Image (tube, rainbow, N blue to C red):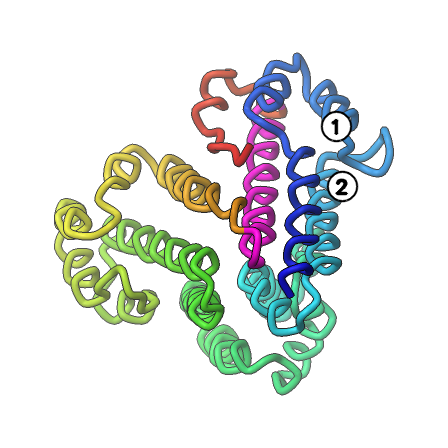
Amino acid sequence: MGELYAYAVARIRSKELGLLNKQALDQLLSSKTYEDCLRFLSEKGWGDSENATAEEMLAGERDKTWEIVNELVKDQKDKETFNVFLYANDFHNLKAAIKEAYTGKQVPNIFIETGTTVGVDVIKECVKNNDFLALPDYMRKCAEEAYEVQFQTGDSQLCDIIIDKATLEAIYQKGKESKNDLISGYAELKCAAANINIAIRSCKTKKGKEFLERAFAKIDTLNVDRLVESALNSEDAIYDYLETTTYADAIDAIKESSSAFEKWCDDKIMNYIKPQKYKAFSYSPIAAYVLAKENEIKSVRIILSGKLNDLPEEEVKERLREMYV
């Protein structure tokens, strides 16, 4: 097993050499036009052809990431542990399928086709027939409940809440089951960030106690009862509570904007996973590479969006994430 891990880590180290560093991102950002950005990425090996679109490039990089994971992670139980990074895509597709069935309208590109654990066709068929037995256990109950709420009441927001909470619970449970510090730490931070966002948004929109209790996922580092109480009170009460938690240093970012808080979360994850590359006898370096690649794709998307919308370079730069390399 040690030799297997050593080989996998050596392969990942070689893949890390292809990750974009801060200097490369700065070059991408300084490209004069959107088309220049695409050419730069193509030269870096993104896309299958010179005419690849941005979405094809981004999807292609994600596909390559999971190809290397499937190549290196041989044990089936370990493979399933990596599903913690894919569950959000599965639940997104469930939400999309229910909305599409309810409205009777097909929306182009609404489904995430790659990077999933449950096929899109399986989910769509389950929703079409209102029969969710083909879904995994962690999705089935929420699918039934969300479907019933959407079709019986037309309450799309409640449908979303049910699915979003189930997403967090699945991620958190898989993180805990992994017994791996990186995976469990990622799941903890991911769910904490979602809970904090829910608290802030709910406070601003004056949501009631029942809504909050239905929306929050229970995790170790945040007391849900305290969070509910704070969100019912005021934003300052939320900040006062967060001061007593491990997320106190996020308060300034939260006050600035939701995008600043999202950046804080992503940077926190990057700083958390950087030491993992030196753990040669576990699958942590592979998991770290998955997160690093996702972070890279997100940063590239931010730059491309900025170019497409003629945003000032400094404004885009402020939103860029901490890089893994």
- The local crowd at label 2, few if under 14, some if 14 to 19, many if 20 or more residues have their Cα within 10 Å, is some
Q: Secondary structure at mark 1?
A: loop
Q: Do the numbered discs 1 and 2 sit on residues whose CB atoms are within 8 Å?
A: no
Which amino acid does the dot numbered 1 rest on?
Lys
Q: Nearer the viewer, residue 230 or 16?
A: 16
Q: Which residue is mark 1?
A: 44
Q: Residue at x 67, y 58 (%)?
A: 115
Q: Nearer the viewer, residue 50 or 150?
A: 50
Q: Is residue 175 left or right of residue 21?
A: left
Image quadrant containing the N terminus: bottom right
Q: Residue at x 48, y 77 (%)?
A: 142
> Who comes first in sequence, dot 1 or dot 2?
1
Residue 100 visible in this rendered orientation of the protein: no
Q: Compared with residue 179, is residue 276 higher up or lower down, i.e. above or below?
A: above
Image quadrant containing the C terminus: top right
Q: Is residue 217 left or right of residue 63?
A: left
Which amino acid does the dot numbered 2 rest on?
Glu
Q: Position of residue 253 (x, y in %)?
A: 30, 36
- The local crowd at label 1, few if under 14, some if 14 to 19, many if 20 or more residues have their Cα within 10 Å, is few
Q: Secondary structure at mark 2?
A: helix
Q: Position of residue 280 (x, y in %)?
A: 57, 51
Q: Which residue is mark 2?
A: 56
Q: Which region is colored magenta?
A: 280-307
Q: Is residue 22 left or right of residue 177?
A: right
